[in-house]
Image (cartoon, rainbow, N blue to C red):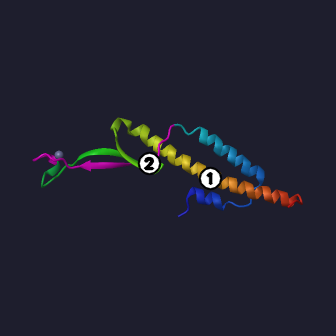
Amino acid sequence: MLTESDSFAMTQDMNLTEVEKRIEALQRRLTQLGPMHPGSITEQYNVCGKAGCRCKDPKKPQKHGPYYQLSYTWRGKSTTRFVRPEHMDPMQRKVANYKRFRELVNDWVDLEVEREQAEREKERQAGGH
Ligand SMILES: [Zn+2]
């Protein structure tokens, strides 16, 4: 499967000005991202320990939930914690921003590799080595 980043890497033969314009556009988008947080959010349903609770109804069990969990690994440390329902909207935006941030950074690195190639190409055309 091709990601957006892969398709960027396959873009060939951009000239130096074009590469630099794209890098500047990426840098602008990076500064406009807003709050971010690594990780992913999952929905959990639980069974409790209480006898006769609806979550253990033999015919139609209704588990407790949903509970929302945020899981992430950062600097080698894995963390999972609950997110309150009223914090879900901002947390989802932060998680989406972080994902976007990583995509933009990958695209930026792709473009820096392109820039290097474009600079060498320019030197070659100018008769240098
Ligand atoms: Zn229960």
- Report which residue position mark 2 lands on: 39
| SS class, disc 1 | helix
Among all residues in the image, which is located at the extreme left? Answer: 52
User: Badge 2: few (under 14), some or many (20 or more) residues near its Cα, within 10 Å?
Assistant: many
Quadrant containing the C terminus is: bottom right
Q: Which mark is residue 107?
A: 1
Q: Which residues are magenta?
A: 35-54
User: Does residue 40 appear in this view?
Assistant: no
Residue furthest to the right: 127
* Furthest residue in direction top, as rendered: 86
Label 1 packing within 10 angstroms: few (<14), some (14-19), many (20+): many
Q: Position of residue 106 (x, y in %)?
A: 60, 53
Q: Tell me which secondary structure the magenta stretch mostly adopts.
A: loop
Q: Residue placed at 56% from the left, 40% from the top? A: 33
Disc 1 from disc 2: Cα separation: 20 Å
Type of amino acid at the residue the image marks with label 2: Gly
Residue 37 - label: none
Name the kind of residue labelled 1 in the image: Asp
